[in-house]
Amino acid sequence: MSQTQGTKKRDKRILSGICPDSKCQAKLFFPPYGSISIECTECGQRHEQKNLLNVEEVTDPDVVLHNLLRNALLGVTGAPKKGTELVKVMGLSNYHCKLLSPVLTRYGMDKQTGKATLLREMNQGEIFDCSLLGGRAFLIEQEHVSTVGYGKDRSGSLIYLHDTLEEIKKANNNKECLIPVHVDGDGHCLVHAVSRALVGRELFWHALRENLKLHFKQNLDRYKALFQDFIDNAEWEDIINECDPLFVPPEGVPLGLRNIHIFGLANVLHRPIILLDSLSGMRSSGDYSATFLPGLVPEEQCRGKDGILNKPICIAWSSSGRNHYLPLVGIKGMPLPRLPPALLPKAWGVPQELIRRYVSLEPCGGCMIGGDRGLQEKYLLRLVGAMEDVFMEKHGIHPALVADVHQYVYRRTGVIGIQPEEVTEAAKKSVQENRLHCCLICNALSELHVPPEWLVPGGKLYNLAKSTHGTLRGDKNYSFPLNNLVCSYCPERDTLVPDYKLSSLSTCTWCHGTSVRHVRGDGSVVYLDGDRTTTRSQGGKCGCGFKHYWEGKEYDNLPEAFPITLEWGGRVVRETVYWFQYEPDPSLNSNVYEVAMRLVTKHFPGEFGSEILVQKVVNTILHHTAKKNPDEYHPVALDGTHVQGQGQAAAAGGGGEVLESDANPPTKIILTGQKGRTLHKEELVMSRAERSLQHSISEQAALSQRRRTQRTRMQDQSGEPRPTSPASASSSSAPPTPTKVPPASGEKKIRVTTSDGRQAMLQLQAHTTYADLQAAIAQALNLQPHQQCIRHGFPPRELPPPPPEQQDLPVPLQHGDRITVEVLKEKAPDTSVDSETHTSDAHNRTLTEPRFRRTASREMQDNIDLEMSSLCLLATLMGEDVWSYAKKLPHLFQQGGVFYNIVKKDMGKFSLSLYICIGIYSASQNTPMFNFLFSYIVNEY
């Protein structure tokens, strides 16, 4: 056991694989050790690791960090797990099939066109004839036996039917050839079980009920004569009504499909149906198991085209309550299941001798179950696709979207037993009113819903509008930002009316992500420019593995953005160009002439002689896009683009009045001291005088800068020393601090501290240059110039060496300043014979490259510090601690976010950062992974 745990600790890799379902193909991430199954985040199936496709090690840390930081650090639970009726196999869920079943009752598929056509137009009657399925039988695939909601039933039937299944297993050479599979318990379980036994899907439950109802009506006299001793004539009306697909039993009346209906289905299908129970139930005197024969159908009509009798299908009770039917089906690749003679029940409702006429018995007295003539999966999917088109045409919404609404909207609110027709109408209305949204992070649906009682007098929103604005007006819009709602007022009804065209959800209901988009009726998402789509990318540079939407097309990469200025006829227009250059499909790359022409036409339409401007724009674009390094790629930042787009949409709405805090943003914030005993008032916005001063400065800045440049040039020509300012040398974001007055002698005392703890006080002259400063540090602290990295200011920034033409200028340090010196590690001297032949260029490169790396690292740290300080201030403004506020902003943890950059910069190793992410999440969930994380860090460091 300890050896296994040691192997897990040592193997720190992360693997990725593709869901083997051909209609799903989701990318999954998992650890390499163990043989545990992986639950697909898209279709809900569980797969063994060995069954996943394209399993490979993840070498790009960004790919996994993106997922872990989004889910683990945020504590995001994401979308709920899919229930049994919503698990998708080959892209179809049970609920999806139920929705299409009424369409299949009256439509068929034209074999030539593949389009759905009414059966009566194909001369096949008004409804589908289920006897055509009399010779069909479903065999489940090996890999789907354990799939929840599709494979083995998990409601307890395996325990209840254990003895019965063991007897069947013994009769089949101790091989498990017949298993109970899942069907939904929604009041149609009998026809669901029969439909699954025939084709593997619940597609024909509606047609089976319609056929059964029609069969009873057409043969009612024969049934009354056959069962006159058992069923009263008054009961037949209820028996027929119970067959209706929309039948709802009266409250408290235990009506439902029972043995007489199974007998009717056997006659509808022209094949026997065997009902099994537990061994104790089958041996009791109760009517719990039976063989239902198609006794009202001539024997010749119960044979296939080959003249062989249709083999019986098998169903069973799932529990001792005997209120739920399950189908028993064979397994593909295994021998066809045989039912031993001891388990073959007696015939129900007809003489026992008829069994030999309708069932092909073996010499031993047993029989074969089902058969091997199943509907091909490809044909079934084509049939479903044709029926989906009819559903879309009739209801204006895709059945897959209806199934998702049932999953994310109704199941979330705890609504159980609602009819599919009601869900369809509600989903259709939600789409039409623009209230349905999809999250791009967790792919879950969210609905913008406002209780009607909030909008009438006495309601929450009505009272808020009334108390804020007094008399409500019909020509005004009233915005409620906290509820993501914009309303108008209807004077006739004295009520607020939601305007969902101007309203939009800001966060996902499930993962609280901010990437929420509207959904169309066909299930497609209304993307914004830059959004990640669900289409996989094969050669993208961003590393997310998916394509990105931009202006109606999908690209493998995000565009690069750069500003451009257009001047014509005295007008100056500034525009941003979005440029695609690295697409695998060359036709998607930007064309410089098309881009230039579009810009000129947009801002200067119909101008004579604008061809000159087009050529200027072309030259400017070519200058911006000329890459010295082919691998250089700086994609556009998405946040600004989306905010701009949303702002334009809001401006288009117009006329709105903000009722809540957005109308009058706070101008001051009260901050408490460290111990909560002191208060500090901080201004959040500028006063009128400050705004006026800022406007004046911005207007005069260009002229002032030019004057300053001319005066400096005159000083340089006259040889006068240029005055230096500490503010110009250090762009510090800290508040100004008083400086000490230097002594009359002109000497400056500077305190020096090193990164290894040494200190010294230097006395510099007024004309001390950068080289003199390095020499003074070398003398006082025994550090050579190439070992020094000098920093000053707050926060400390590097004081770089001046350019060659300014080496004689004094260093910009004032009396009383403090500088820090980072001690750089000295490389071991090269003792080879050829060391003296190294050129000065190589030596300069050796000294320059570390400095570039340090500068990039410091710039990243400065950005992180700035973003964290802003985050702290915003959290304080919202009255929350930093972590609680940050958890509501998933983009901070995605690639490019501040927390993402902190993890990537500080943790060093990809494996360490990965497991720290897992550990933080595990500790928050109180799991043993936290102990594993601690031991891992101790072993590594």
Image: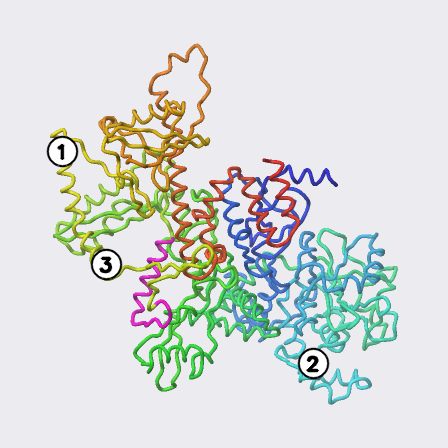
| 165 inside magenta stretch | no
Secondary element type, mark 2: helix
What predominant SS class does the magenta segment belong to?
Answer: helix
How far is the residue under mark 3 from the one under mark 1? 34 Å
Q: Which residue is mark 2?
A: 216
Residue at image location 20% in from the left, 56% down from the top: 693
The amino acid marked with disc number 2 is Phe
Q: Please name whichever residue, 156 or 750, is drawn nearer the observer in this view of the structure.
A: 750
Disc 1 marks which residue?
A: 715
Mark 1 nearby-residue class (10 Å; few <14, some 14–19, many ≥20):
some
| Magenta extent | 639-662
Counting from the top left corner in percent of width and height, residue 144 is at 67, 55
Q: Is residue 388 above or below residue 818?
A: below
Tell me the crowding category of disc 3: few under 14, some 14 to 19, or many 20 or more residues within 10 angstroms, Cα based.
few
Q: Is residue 172 left or right of residue 568?
A: right
The residue identified by callout 3 is 691
Q: Which mark is residue 174?
A: none
Residue type at mark 3 is: Arg
In the displayed image of the protein, which residue is found farthest to the front?
744
Q: Earlier in the sequence, mark 2 or mark 3?
A: 2
Task: Locate the N terminus and report the quarter of the image it occupies.
Answer: top right
- Position in image of residue 159 (x %, y %): 79, 62
Q: Nearer the viewer, residue 306 or 921?
A: 921
The residue most toward the top is: 833
Does residue 786 appear in this view? yes
**Which quarter of the figure has residue 630?**
top left
Percent of width and height locating residue 199: 66, 62
